[in-house]
Image (cartoon, rainbow, N blue to C red):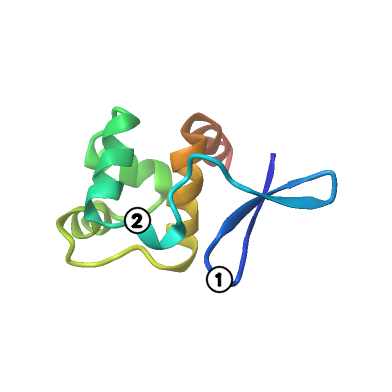
Amino acid sequence: MRLRLKADGRIVELRDGQELPLQGAPAVGEAGPLAVRDLRRRACLTQMEFAAKLGVPVETIRNWEQGKRAPRGPARALLAVIAHAPDMVFQALAKV
């Protein structure tokens, strides 16, 4: 599966040269505190484990979940893709 982040914040799937809306993923702008916490919990990960898998400090995850800060740019896109295919994303990140 190939994904592309559009300038307007949408994530689309590239299939046969066409851009198709990514089904089941929240819009990139919807990665608020509850969405981040929900993604982490659905993955059955602690904040420390989630932070390690994403390669960010645990304080970043805490700040996102407490609403002190919001994911921006690539982090928002990554969270949207995790919402759609968490196993594939974590498997790919493990190889980096």
- Residue under the image location 29 percent in, 27 percent down: 44
Pointer 1 local density, CA inside 10 Å: few below 14, some 14–19, many at least 20: few
Question: In this orientation, does residue 49 appear?
Answer: no
Instruction: Inspect this view and state whether residue 22 appears.
Output: yes
Q: What residue lies at 21% left-to-right and 57% top-to-bottom?
A: 59
Quarter of the view holding residue 63: bottom left
Residue that appears at 62% across and 65% down: 6
Look at label 2 and name its amino acid: Ala
* SS state under label 1: loop
Q: Image check: 56 left or right of 19?
A: left
Nearest the camera: 53 or 29? Answer: 29
- Where residue 72 sits, quadrant-wise, is bottom left
Q: Say above or below: 59 vs 25.
A: below
Q: In 3D space, how far apart are the residues under numbered discs 2 and 1 (Cα atoms)?
A: 15 Å
> Viewed as shown, does residue 29 lie left or right of 85?
left
**Residue that badge 1 annotates:** 8
Q: Identify the disc placed on residue 78.
A: none
x then y, percent, for residue 19: 73, 53
Q: Quadrant of the N terminus?
A: top right
From the top left corner, tell me how far across and down residue 74 is, in percent: 49, 62
Look at the image and tell me in which quarter the C terminus lies: top right
Circle 2: element type = loop
The residue lying furthest to the bottom in this view is 7
Q: Nearer the viewer, residue 35 or 46?
A: 35
Question: Residue 7 location in percent, x, y?
Answer: 60, 72
Q: Pointer 2: what residue?
A: 31
- In the picture shown, does residue 51 fall above or below 75? above
Q: Residue at horizontal 51%, vertical 46%? A: 81
The answer to which of marks 2 and 1 sits earlier in the sequence is: 1
- Give the left or right position of residue 14, taking residue 45 as reference: right
